[in-house]
Image (cartoon, rainbow, N blue to C red):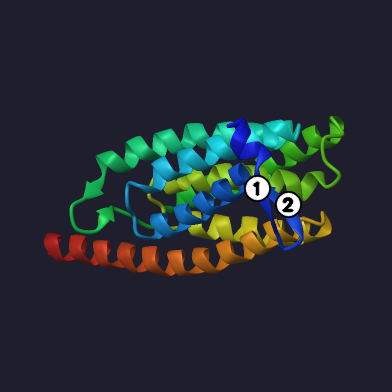
Amino acid sequence: MNFLLEHGLTVFGQWISIAELVGQICALAVVFLAERRTLWTWPVQVGATVLLFAVYTSAHLGGLASRQVAILLISLYGWWAWARRKDPVYGVVVRKGRLVERLVMTGVFAAGTVAMALLLDALNASWAPWPDAAIFIGTLVAFGAQGLGLVEFWLVWLAVDAIGVPLQIASGLYFSAAIYLVFAVLVIHGWWSWNRSAQRARAEVTAASS
């Protein structure tokens, strides 16, 4: 791992280690794979979290490193959950969330952001605790909903991207901001794809019960 952290290349005027570059590429691949509802989504995500955990630990960014641990745990759950609901033709079965599930997602996002922002502010752990907290909590909510196969997880990711791009630019992290923009394009397409699949699945259930 030290080799991957100590060697790298310059991208957009910023030096980036092999571990960070491969980790970010894997993170992008996860969005691409998730759109196709393939089980490979989760092992690739696990690889991304391991690499990015090493990157953030070496940079002494405990909060971001902790975020990777949380994502890793949710990814292991998602891997298990998708393996149980895999369809031989369409991949994992997806659906739109029920009203109560949408309310829970919204409530967790809002309450979690407030709690996390206050914690970051109290610890003086972030110069922008509110958007920082929203990205952290939004990421966990998105991965949790993705593990359940809910179409709405793409909308949570879109909210995270909308918050993340200006934060990365304000932080001078232009490469990361560019990655977030690519994420946003993939997320919009992924939402469209999953939404169509959910509508088709619901139509098939309706037809079968008629």
Determine if residue 53 is in view: no
- Please tell me which residue is depicted at 55% across the width and 45% down the height of the picture: 141
Q: Nearer the viewer, residue 106 or 99?
A: 106
- Please tell me which residue is depicted at 80% across the width and 44% down the height of the picture: 129
Residue type, numbered disc 1: Gly
Residue type, numbered disc 2: Trp
Direction from residue 149 to residue 103 in the image, left or right:
right
- Please tell me which residue is depicted at 54% across the width and 35% down the height of the picture: 50
Q: Which of 8 and 24 is in front in this view?
A: 8
> Whole-percent x and y of residue 27?
52, 50
Q: Do labels 2 and 1 touch, CB within 8 Å?
A: yes
Residue under label 1: 8
> Whole-percent x and y of residue 87?
21, 51
Crowding at dot 2, Cα within 10 Å, few <14 / some 14-19 / many 20+, comes out as few
Residue 15, numbered label: 2
> Whole-percent x and y of residue 184?
58, 65
- Please tell me which residue is depicted at 25% across the width and 62% down the height of the picture: 201
Q: Which of 90 and 97 is in front in this view?
A: 90
